[in-house]
Amino acid sequence: SSTMMYGHVDRPEHWVAHLNVLRRIQDRTGGFTEFVPLPFVHQSSPLYLAGAARPGPTHRDNRAVHALARIMLHGRIPQIQTSWVKLGVQRSQVMLSGGANDLGGTLMEETISRMAGSEHGSAKTVAELVSIAEGIGRPARQRTTTYATRAA
């Protein structure tokens, strides 16, 4: 996996620089199977509470990061994941319509985002994830960590 947390002290030029680093690493190693943009969850973050960060990314930032990743990583890292646990269902659906092609997993009991203040839950069933994707006309399939189709 490759990731990038954004929406705290960063600006768009930082996103471009980070994605360029990932492109160079991927060109050298071929080891990344996906890119996961991680929007900063600010509500209980010590960085935000100390006044050193902004209150997370805007919706426009979220859309820009996912779309930029799709463009800049095209041909290198095929999967761009959206984080339903950080963005919620509706915003994740928007990301699936504009750059992301992976909704992520069911999770068991995600705690990092919840501890930072996320209110979008810590687990989803397979049926819930299928419903999220199909709700915007996108196909859904179960997969392995390496993106092979999982046997039913």
Image: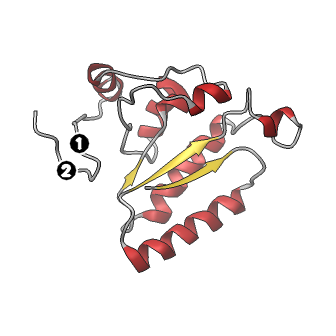
Amino acid type, mark 2: Ala
Q: What is the count of numbered marks?
A: 2
In the image, farthest residue toward the left: 152
In 3D space, how far apart are the residues under numbered discs 1 and 2 (Cα atoms)?
Answer: 5 Å
| 2 up-or-down from 94: above or below | below
- Asked whether, in this view, residue 17 is left or right of residue 72, the answer is right
- Position in image of residue 91 (x %, y %): 52, 29
Location of the N terminus by quadrant is bottom left
Q: Secondary structure at mark 2?
A: loop
- Asked whether, in this view, residue 44 is left or right of residue 109, the answer is right
Q: Is residue 54 visible?
A: no
The residue under the point 84% across, 32% down is 49
Mark 1, other Cα within 10 Å: few <14 / some 14–19 / many ≥20? some
**Disc 1 vs disc 2: Cβ atoms closer than 8 Å?**
yes
- Asked whether, in this view, residue 131 is left or right of residue 68, the answer is left
Mark 2, other Cα within 10 Å: few <14 / some 14–19 / many ≥20? few
The residue under the point 62% across, 48% down is 5
In the image, farthest residue toward the bottom: 28
| 106 up-or-down from 77: above or below | above
Residue 125 lies in what quarter of the image? top left
**Numbered circle sitting on residue 148:** 2
- Position in image of residue 117 (x %, y %): 66, 24
The residue wearing badge 1 is 143
* Nearer to us in this view, 24 or 137: 24
* Nearer to us in this view, 108 or 149: 108
**Numbered circle sitting on residue 64:** none
The residue under the point 42% across, 23% down is 123
Mark 1 / mark 2, whichever is N-terminal = 1
* Nearer to us in this view, 49 or 14: 49
* Nearer to us in this view, 125 or 72: 125
